[in-house]
Image (cartoon, helix red, strand yellow):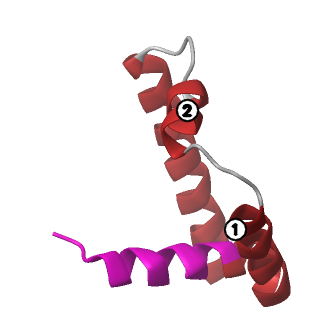
């Protein structure tokens, strides 16, 4: 099982990779300033999507990332 600390580290790394270090810190600051209902966000995130749709989209992203990484090594 992954620890809370590992989740925080991986999450920040993902943000930093996507937004850069400054963008990641700005994102965290924005989240901390605004009231945020995680449960509502999770409920609305996958609204009207079946498990099959979500799985298909996840597989498409995984495939695209694998192709992108493979292309970078060539």
- Pick the quarter of the image with the N terminus: bottom left
- Pick the quarter of the image with the C terminus: bottom right
| 53 sits to left or right of 1 | right
Q: Where is residue 11 in the image (x, y as percent from the top left)?
A: 52, 73
Query: Mark 2 to mark 1: distance in Å?
Result: 16 Å
Would you say the magenta stretch is mainly helix, strand or loop?
Answer: helix
Q: Where is residue 17 in the image (x, y as percent from the top left)?
A: 69, 79
Question: Which of disc 1 and disc 2 is earlier in sequence?
Answer: 1
| 14 sits to left or right of 33 | left
Badge 1 density bin: few <14, some 14–19, many ≥20, Cα 10 Å: few
- Residue found farthest to the bottom: 21
Residue 26 lies in the magenta-colored region? no
- Above or below, comparing residue 51 to residue 45 in the picture: above
Please name the residue that numbered disc 2 is placed on.
40
Q: Where is residue 49 in the image (x, y as percent from the top left)?
A: 52, 15
Q: Tag 2's secondary structure?
A: helix
Residue in the image at 70% along x and 51% along y: 35
Residue 9 lies in the magenta-colored region? yes
| 27 sits to left or right of 53 | right
């Amino acid at each position: 099982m992954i620890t809370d600390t590992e989740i925080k580290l991986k999450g920040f790394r993902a943000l930093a990779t996507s937004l850069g270090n400054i963008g990641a810190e700005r994102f965290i600051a924005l989240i901390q300033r605004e009231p945020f209902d995680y449960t509502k966000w999770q409920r609305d995130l996958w609204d009207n999507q079946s498990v099959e749709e979500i799985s298909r989209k996840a597989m498409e992203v995984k495939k695209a990332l694998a192709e992108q990484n493979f292309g970078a090594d060539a």
